[in-house]
Image (cartoon, helix red, strand yellow):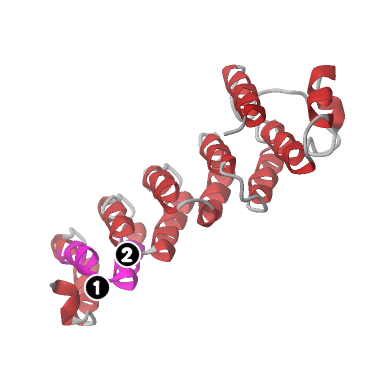
């Protein structure tokens, strides 16, 4: 991470110390992404010294701590327009947001960062208290695919919500491979009869090579 982005990270830590995402920064009539009045003189001088892309990222740093969750969701969605490695750090920061809609947007944006970082956050998302976030995490794991994603879905197989467990079974069948099929076999002992039957049906569709 560059010195400038390290500076932005320290700014983010300061915002976290003051309350983290959604810290009270006063009601605004404009989006903080556009409203330069939110910044101190020093902040504005730093912005002018940066390249346009870095300026945009700094705006998003501040937007991720706005009092309005809709603004924070917008900031997360705009992060997908960048390819800088710092985007993964920003998404990790946004994932501690207290509003579920922001966390959901983070999960939906994880396809834009390195797979290992994405899977790490998805592992956390699968324990979120909101069903919407956990369901999105299951879908994201299915999209990533591979044994690592299948292993993370083991968390969803013991979810208290039967619908999440059902989605996890479909995701595992979609991912395929020996790890996924091993987890499908574990689902044969699920407490829910319908899920046990679903596991049987999905296993019957599985190529024999996946069991090797």
Quarter of the image for residue 18 reads top right
| Residue 193 in view (yes/no) | no
Q: Residue 44: x percent and y percent?
A: 83, 25
Residues under labels 1 and 2: Cα distance? 8 Å
| Callout 1 secondary element | helix
* Residue 166 tag number: 2
Which residue appears at 65% of the width and 45% of the height?
A: 73
**Secondary-structure class at tag 2:** helix
Q: Is residue 131 left or right of residue 97?
A: left
Q: Is residue 154 magenta?
A: no
Q: Within the image, what quadrant is residue 9 found in?
A: top right
Please give the range of residues in magenta. 165-185
Relative to residue 40, is residue 169 drawn left or right? left
Look at 30% across and 66% down and name the residue there: 172
Q: Please tell me which residue lies in front, 33 or 4.
A: 4
In the figure, is residue 142 to the left or right of 104? left
**Image x and y of residue 52, in percent:** 79, 42
**Dominant secondary-structure state across the stretch colored magenta:** helix
- Quarter the C terminus occupies: bottom left
On the image, the x and y values in percent for residue 167 come to: 36, 64
Disc 1 packing (10 Å; few <14; some 14–19; many ≥20): some
Q: Position of residue 207 (x, y in %)?
A: 21, 81
Residue 142 appears in the figure? yes
Crowd class of label 2 (few under 14; some 14 to 19; many from 20; radius 10 Å): some
Q: Which residue matches tag 1?
A: 198
Task: Reply above or below: 188 against 125.
Answer: below
Of the two numbered discs 1 and 2 on the same chain, state the one appearing first in sequence.
2
> Circles 1 and 2: CB distance less than 8 Å?
yes
Q: Is residue 170 magenta?
A: yes
């Amino acid at each position: 991470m560059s010195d400038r982005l390290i500076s932005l990270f320290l700014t983010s830590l300061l915002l976290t110390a003051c309350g983290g995402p959604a810290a009270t920064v006063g009601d605004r009539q404009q989006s903080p992404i556009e409203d330069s009045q939110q910044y101190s003189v020093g902040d504005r001088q730093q912005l002018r010294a940066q390249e346009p892309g870095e300026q945009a990222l700094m705006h998003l740093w501040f937007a991720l701590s706005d009092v309005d969750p809709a603004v924070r969701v917008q900031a997360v969605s705009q992060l997908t327009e960048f390819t800088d490695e710092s985007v993964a750090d920003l998404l990790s920061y946004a994932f501690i947001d207290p509003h579920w809609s922001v966390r959901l947007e983070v999960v939906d944006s994880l396809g834009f960062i390195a797979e290992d970082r994405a899977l790490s956050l998805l592992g956390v998302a699968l324990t979120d208290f909101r069903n919407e976030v956990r369901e999105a995490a299951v879908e994201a794991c299915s999209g990533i695919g591979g044994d690592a994603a299948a292993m993370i879905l083991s968390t969803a197989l013991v979810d208290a919500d039967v619908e999440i467990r059902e989605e996890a079974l479909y995701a595992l069948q979609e991912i395929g491979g020996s790890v996924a099929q091993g987890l499908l076999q574990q689902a044969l002992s699920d407490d829910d009869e319908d899920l046990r039957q679903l596991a049987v049906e999905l296993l019957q569709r599985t190529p024999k090579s996946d069991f090797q």
